[in-house]
Image: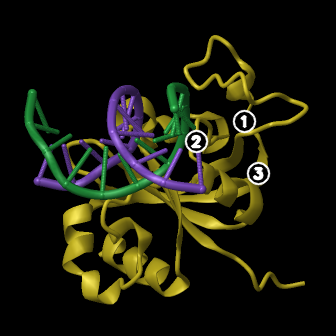
Chain colours: A yellow, B green, C purple
DNA sequence: GCCAACGTTGGC
DNA sequence: GCCAACGTTGGC
């Protein structure tokens, strides 16, 4: 059966916290995408992401913000256990195993771009990226959808 | 380090 | 339910 509903995403991470080098160093280049504490982003993780979806890995809050590679979603949304851990900086006592508030997915590294596709360059192509959430004013979402046409166009830019 | 934009909190 | 105060995000 074909999957007609594959979706594309963009995941932000601060490289000083967890960058693409860190993902590359993980066993099987796979890890939990934990620590998301925003409801809109949570809803995407919990309700919309599926195994087989693909996402851009975006470095934020750093010298050269931009897209640095791609990952595949290898496990759909499930409770973020870091919220249950009092020793975690992501601890949230309002989230319990019985009634989890925060969710995560598992991702596996699929591609590292030879160069960062910088936010500055993405902005230069804004006319081809109408509606891209990353370019919306004041955007702060750390998990956002990417339209298939935008995915293809950004991938082309990143690989050249 | 600055600061605009945004989300959350909590008093009322 | 309003909204001011506050904390966070994230580009520059």
Crowd band around label 1 with a 10 angstrom C-alpha radius: few (<14), some (14–19), many (20+): many
Q: Which circle's residue, 2 or 3, is located before the other in the chain? A: 2
Residue A58 or A110: which is nearer the viewer? Answer: A58
Q: Is residue A9 above or below residue A59?
A: below
* The image quarter in which residue A112 lies: bottom left
- Quarter of the picture containing the N terminus of chain A is bottom right
Residues tagged 2 and 1 counted as in contact (Cβ below 8 A): yes
The residue sitting at 52% across, 80% down in the picture is: A147
- Given contact means CB atoms under 8 Å apart, are the residues at marks 1 and 3 in contact? no
- Residue at 38 percent of width and 76 percent of height: A154
The residue that mark 1 highlights is: A80
Q: Residue beneath label 3, please?
A: A77
Image label count? 3
Asked whether residue A2 is in view, the answer is yes
**Distance between the Cα atoms at labels 2 and 3?**
12 Å
Marks 2 and 3 belong to one chain: yes
Q: Few, some or many C-alpha atoms within 10 Å of disc 3 (few <14, some 14-19, many ≥20)?
A: many
* Residue A36, label in figure: 2
Nearest the camera: A107 or A34? A34
How much space separates mark 1 and mark 3, taking CA atoms? 9 Å
Task: Please say whether residue A50 is visible from this viewpoint.
Answer: no
Marks 2 and 1, how far apart at CA: 9 Å
Residue A37 position within the rendered picture, expressed as x and y whole percent measured from the top left: 58, 40
Q: Position of residue A145 (x, y in %)?
A: 55, 69
Upstream in sequence: badge 2 or badge 1: 2
């Amino acid at each position: 059966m074909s999957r007609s509903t594959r979706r594309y995403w963009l995941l932000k991470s601060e490289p000083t916290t967890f960058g693409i080098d860190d993902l590359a160093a993980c066993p099987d280049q796979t890890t939990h995408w934990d620590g998301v504490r925003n409801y809109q982003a949570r809803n995407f993780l919990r309700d919309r992401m599926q195994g087989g979806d693909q996402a851009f890995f975006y470095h934020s809050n750093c010298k050269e913000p931009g897209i640095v590679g791609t990952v595949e979603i290898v496990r759909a949304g499930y409770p973020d256990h870091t919220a249950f851990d009092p020793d975690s900086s992501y601890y949230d006592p309002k989230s319990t195993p019985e009634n989890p508030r925060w969710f995560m997915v598992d991702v596996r590294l699929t591609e590292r771009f030879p160069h960062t596709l910088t936010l500055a360059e993405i902005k230069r192509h804004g006319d081809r990226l109408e509606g891209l959430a990353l370019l919306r004013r004041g955007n702060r979402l750390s998990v956002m959808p990417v339209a298939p046409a935008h995915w293809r166009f950004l991938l082309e830019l990143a690989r050249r």
